[in-house]
Image: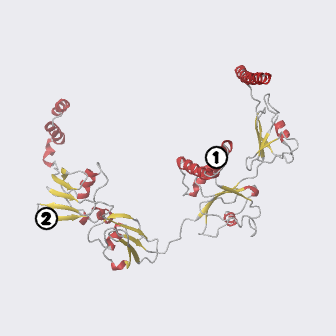
Amino acid sequence: MLHCHFLAKFLKKTKSVAAIFLLVTISMFGQNSNSMQSQTVTIVPSIVVTIGGDAPVTGTFGALAHERLDQIMTRVFERVSSKYALRGITIKRNQQEIIKADIERFRITGDYAFNPILKNEDVIICPNVNLDLDYFYIFGAIKVGGKHQFMEGDRLADAILLSQGLNPAYENVHQVEISRLSYDGLTEQIIRSEISDNIEIKRGDRIRVLADENYRRFYGVFIAGEVKTPGFIPLTRKDNNLSLVISKAGGLLESADADRAIVFNSNDLTAIYINRQNPSVSLDQAGDMQRLQSGILEQISSIEKSLFLRTSNLTEEDTANFAIETRLRTLVNQNRINVANYLDSVSEAAHYSIQTGDIVYIPPKEKFVYVFGQVAQPGKISYVQGKDYHYYIDKCKGYGELAKKEVMVITGENKEWISTKNIEKEVIVKAGDYIFVPKVPVHGYPYYVDLASKYTSILGAVATTALLFIQILKK
């Protein structure tokens, strides 16, 4: 072991391959000289293979003995490109033997007959592949549809095999329909065949595996809020209404505000919106609800606005308001429904059609009025029927020092702003409403100096105009 110590120091300086081999040998056999005879070193022989043809990388490469074609192709090609031929590969051995390989078929079937073991000095020739011309396309009642590299002699069974077989979700799959274009691409030949006939296919064929549509899909909606059993409600393909959904959810709770049920149409953003309004509601239980990226939502809103404004005659001021309304309509696609008598066959809920992916929210009855702005103690005040906005402001310890007397009542249902300045109009406060007390603007000395200078400029211009007018009259 002393020799190993000195040799290790030597390696740090020389990094000699021979010294490394010697160190490994000593470490394996130097610890117990009596056991050296029982120790064996396994040497894995190496080979060289040549890659040619239309491959991402060509040349001669080292490989391990017993390594298969797929291994070296993956190791060498994937570092450069993911696009190369997987079928029709030729291996030339000893300049005499020709071996055909089909890596795509091997990866699907696991049959090593299509992925041969390489030998020393094998030459791998990759064919040129142009999937715009050398292809067939298969779709329909198969597991994985798509475009595949075509090889001369391919038959229908080969196409189905490369698509990982028939899809067991479909019943009575017996036929295919092949669309075959003429050479000039102007005419189409439709060929119907039994799958069992296993006909030969041609380059450029579009193969549709025929089957009646399977309608066992994930139909359903998600309901949250004041119902007995909220969550996902499975439905059939059609003839679904809001009354049915509420019934399947066990009916309404006593705390439900039946006058203000909301149905959000299938729009991924609605899940986020509801969670913001009611953080205790977990809508991720719906399973298949996915979020749209904000960039896509921005594009949808922009397109909607452009389509509406194309032939409009809105003024510049109106356009800004219209843009806000369009954005809200695009992002929050909702309808408010009265579900108080949902079991009645003539009720609004019974006639409201529900679509898969919709979200139903039954809000709780509101118990508070929200007061904020320039009041002494803003917050939630318990609702008392018949009380006006003065009552709730008094409950918040009155107006602040900078409060404007024009109080705004914002309705909880549709966020409409109602001014209390018009004393002739009675402003009714309901549970869930907001009372906002604005602030009197406070300006510093520079603001008034700037304002005075503007007025002075206007007066000077008026005076100059008046003098000119008087001089003209004197003449």
Q: Earlier in the sequence, mark 1 or mark 2?
A: 2
Residue 97: mark? 2
Q: Is residue 207 above or below residue 23?
A: below
Outermost residue toward the right in this view: 424
Residue 193 quadrant = bottom left
Asked if one can make out residue 281 in the rendered structure from this viewpoint, the answer is: no
Q: Quadrant of the N terminus?
A: top left
Q: Residue at x 53, y 50 (%)?
A: 296
Give the amino acid type for the residue marked by disc 1 in the picture: Ala
Foreground: 263 or 120?
263
Image coordinates of residue 242 in percent, x first then y, are 68, 64
| C-alpha gap between disc 1 and disc 2 | 73 Å
Name the secondary structure under disc 2. strand
Residue 86 in sight here: yes
The label number, if any, that marks residue 323 in the structure image: 1
x and y, in percent, of residue 253 in the image: 73, 58
Residue 52: name its quadrant. bottom left
Question: Does residue 281 appear to the left or right of 137 in the view shown?
Answer: right
* Residue nearest the observer in this picture, 373 or 223: 373
What's the colour scheme? secondary structure
What amino acid is labelled 2 in the image? Answer: Glu
Q: Position of residue 199 (x, y in %)?
A: 32, 77
